[in-house]
Structures are given as structure tokens and as C-alpha cells.
Image (cartoon, rainbow, N blue to C red):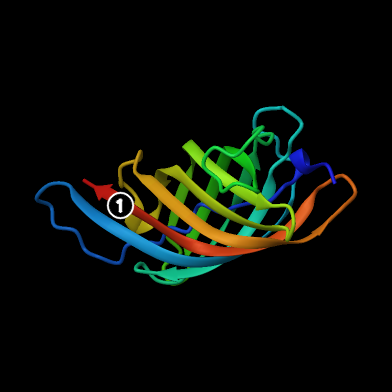
Amino acid sequence: MRVYRLAVGITVGLMLTVATVWAADGPKEKTIRSEFACSSVPSTFDNNGDGITATTHQCIGKGTGGPFTSQGVSELLAPLPAPVTCPQGTIEYPYEAIFDVATNSNTFDQLIAGDVQPPGAFCLNPNGLTFTFDVTYFFFRGTGKLDGAQGGSTIHSQGTGSIVACDPAGLCVSNYSGTSETTLIFP
């Protein structure tokens, strides 16, 4: 398996809609925490044109904003020569890009997020084909009740998963779960 081509999508959306009515007396902040479970498959999306393609992921979750679904892509860079933030004995892949849309299952409001804030890491244990991830990315905008929320808020996601199957080119299908947290700022 060409490990550098390992395509395992890690979701980042996993943000939920806010079901709170906001007062008009200045900016308000809302912290959103969630749990999620996802599956990912290889895609042809290549954000930086380096030949390492992204994965497409689909997720379900629940949290302080209600139940949600999420869909997006995650792209990794080539592995580092030695782990920097990952445990020894693992292979560390930095994130190149993440783009995600999370939809509240009750209200259909959406959060759109993406762009990785270094040093997000995907840590692969080559012995058991299990992995951990820890990544921070940015909220871009929202729809419905989330319309007008200020972009630039960071979203932090982390979790664990496993590789289900890989083809001879090293493109893999995976499943994973984790948690996510963000604070959105509303005018």
C-alpha cells in the first residue's frame, strides 16, 4: 500500500445550529459541542494539485444544537519523516485542506467550514490500521438562524477510527468517531 496516498477523511463540520433567540444589544457568543460518527471514501478532489487526493465523508451527530448530518472532503499531505505531534510508532500526516457543510436535522440550517489551522495531525498506527486525529479549522458562514454569524471562529475536532479496506493504490475506506467544539459569534 502506498501509505502517502492513504485517503482517510476526517470530518470537520460537525457544528450544529443554534436554537437560541439572540438579544439585539451587541455581539453574542454561542459554544456548540457535538459528538459524531462518520464514514469516508476516496474522491478525486485534489486541493493543492500534488496528486494526493482527498476523501469524501458523511457523518451523523448530536450536540448542543440538536441532531445533524455532515458532508465534506478532507485532504492530507505526504507523511512527515518522523512524528512531530503524533505518538512514536505512528505515521503523521499533516492536513492540507478540509471543507464541510453540516445541516441541522430539525431546522435545516447549515454551517459551512474549512481551511486548516496548523498543526492539525492525522496519526496512523500502521500495525493495526487504526488512527487518531486532532484538527482545528474555520467557520465560514451559516444559513437560517446561523446567517450573520461571524466567520473566523475556530472549530476543534478530535477522535479515533479505523481503516476498513484499501485498494492496491492505497486508497482506503474508513470509519471514525469523535467530538467537536466551536464558539460562534453573532452580531
State the image coordinates of residue 45 (x, y, percent, origin top left): 71, 39
- Tell me: 101 left or right of 18: right
Q: Nearer the viewer, residue 86 or 47?
A: 86
State the image coordinates of residue 17 (x, y, percent, origin top left): 37, 61
- Tell me: 160 left or right of 147: right
Kindly identify which residue carries mark 1.
183
State the image coordinates of residue 117 (x, y, percent, origin top left): 45, 36
Secondary structure beneath label 1 = strand
- Tell me: 151 left or right of 100: left
Query: Compared to 152, does 35 lie above or below?
Result: below
Which residue reaches farthest left?
Answer: 25
- Name the residue at 41% across, 68% down: 107
Q: Nearer the viewer, residue 104 or 174?
A: 174
Across the whole image, how many numbered discs are drawn on residues?
A: 1
Query: Compared to 138, does 34 lie above or below?
Result: below
State the image coordinates of residue 12 (x, y, percent, origin top left): 51, 52
Q: Nearer the viewer, residue 128 or 135?
A: 128
Which residue reaches farthest front?
Answer: 88
- Tell me: 29 left or right of 113: left
- Name the residue at 69% across, 34% down: 78
Asked which quadrant contains residue 140, the reply is top left
Q: Badge 1: how crowded within 10 Å, few (<14), some, or many (20+)?
A: some
Which residue reaches farthest top?
Answer: 49
- Name the residue at 63% across, 40% down: 93
Asked which quadrant contains residue 38, the reply is bottom right
- Name the residue at 71% across, 60% down: 174
Query: Compared to 109, does 63 lie above or below?
Result: below
Asked which quadrant contains residue 11, the reply is bottom right
Q: Amino acid at mark 1?
A: Thr
